[in-house]
Image (cartoon, rainbow, N blue to C red):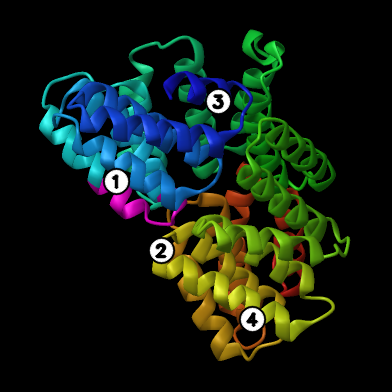
Amino acid sequence: MMDAAEARTATRDWKAAADAYAAAAHIAGMGGRVEEAWRAWFAAGSCWRRADDVVQAERCLRRALELTEIGGQACLLTAPQLAGTLADLGDAEAAEDLLESIAAEAGTIELDAVFVDTRISALLTLGRKEAARVLLASLEERRLEGPEGIAVRARSAQLLALDGELVRARQEWRKLGSGKHALSGDPILRATVLGGLAEVDLLLGEERRALDQFEEASECWREAGRESLAWRAEAGRIRAMVALGVTPFPGLLTTGLEYAREHRLRPLEIGLLLARGLALVSSDAHDAEEDLTEAMELAMMSGLPVLVGRAALARAGRLPIDDEQRQHLLDTAAMASVSHVPLAARVALARARLLARFDPVQARRVARACLPRLEHMHMRREVLAARALVRQLGGTP
């Protein structure tokens, strides 16, 4: 059964491979061969995760974890896979709780870089940037090479973007994309770099470049057989089109939403709802409001603050609602975007625009206060908008 599973894995027939590994795990378990059963359950869970069946992946990986000794090597290999699956399901809190408890049990053992990186991912998803920064510093001290070193550099670029150091973040992504590893043709590495670059360029006002990068990232993810990540890039492509002023066709995202819901991929579902809502604003405000509201509510339920902030800001800035509701949404967006400096600056600018309707003096103060932050981040479109607002309100930028 293991031979059959490995043959299926080689052809990327993830579901068939997972079934074969699970059958092998049952056989090993009945024979009392614990290590082999663990290895087979672990492989089955990993294959199910690649097939985007995270419910089956969670079941297999929990079976694998039950066969390990807390703090042992098998446990430290299994826990990050299970935590990643929980995050895919939209429960980053449970993912972090699992990893935190196992790290505490491990004591002074130096944890594998993948284990630490998975914790960093969960913490950033939860908006706990400073805790993630401490863990990233511990990895940087190790001066890791190969895939682990690439992952560390990618996290560093991600953190720079969250801090508002957008030009530096773009430089880091570009260096990573032009390094010797990028020349190997690995579609996963290429897609990761392109996605990171696209998000930064979108914040910098380079929408056309971001659009092209999201498109190529989507193609790379599909080449690698990662359908869910291809849909995530597709959601980014739609956001770039909206920012560019192009009206996208939202129908394709409905297929992606069906995929996300069928596979219970909650963060992907939220991202696609947000993108489809933005795409619908100009043609169907009612459906746009439904999508953006659902995205915000699901993000709140899942404890995903950045997605809460994006959805709240989109509702406040793009829908025909009254000022009281707009103010409430901006308050929500401000609280949710604490860990995301560029998003927080966009929220501040939106607040200044709202204040301009009934308190121009305060609006000018808010706009002038956020202008230096926007200039430092080189957020071109927002800088121009803030300067124009200050002039409109009788001030000097």
Q: Position of residue 296 (x, y in %)?
A: 52, 71
In terms of sequence position, does the residue under pointer 4 or pointer 1 come before the other? Answer: 1
In this rendering, the answer to whether 351 lies above or below 263 is below
Question: Main SS type for the magenta part?
Answer: helix
Q: Is residue 352 visible?
A: no
- Looking at the picture, which amino acid does disc 2 mark? Ser
Distance between the alpha carbons at the discs numbered 3 and 2: 32 Å
- Range of magenta residues: 87-97
Q: Which residue is mark 1?
A: 96
Q: Is residue 284 left or right of residue 47?
A: right
Q: Quadrant of residue 22?
A: top left
- Looking at the picture, which amino acid does disc 4 mark? Glu
- Closer to the camera: disc 3 or disc 4? 3
In terms of sequence position, does the residue under pointer 3 or pointer 2 come before the other? Answer: 3
Residue in the image at 84% along x and 55% along y? 244
Residue in the image at 50% along x and 59% along y? 264
Tell me the element at label 1: helix
Q: Position of residue 75 (x, y in %)?
A: 23, 29
Q: Which residue is mark 2?
A: 302
Q: 86 or 262, which is in the foreground?
A: 262
- Looking at the picture, which amino acid does disc 3 mark? Thr
Distance between the alpha carbons at the discs numbered 2 and 4: 18 Å
In terms of sequence position, does the residue under pointer 3 or pointer 4 come before the other? Answer: 3
Q: 157 or 107, which is in the foreground?
A: 107
For mark 1, does the 10 Å Cα neighbourhood hold few (<14), some (14 to 19), or many (20 or more) residues? Answer: many
Q: Which residue is mark 3?
A: 9
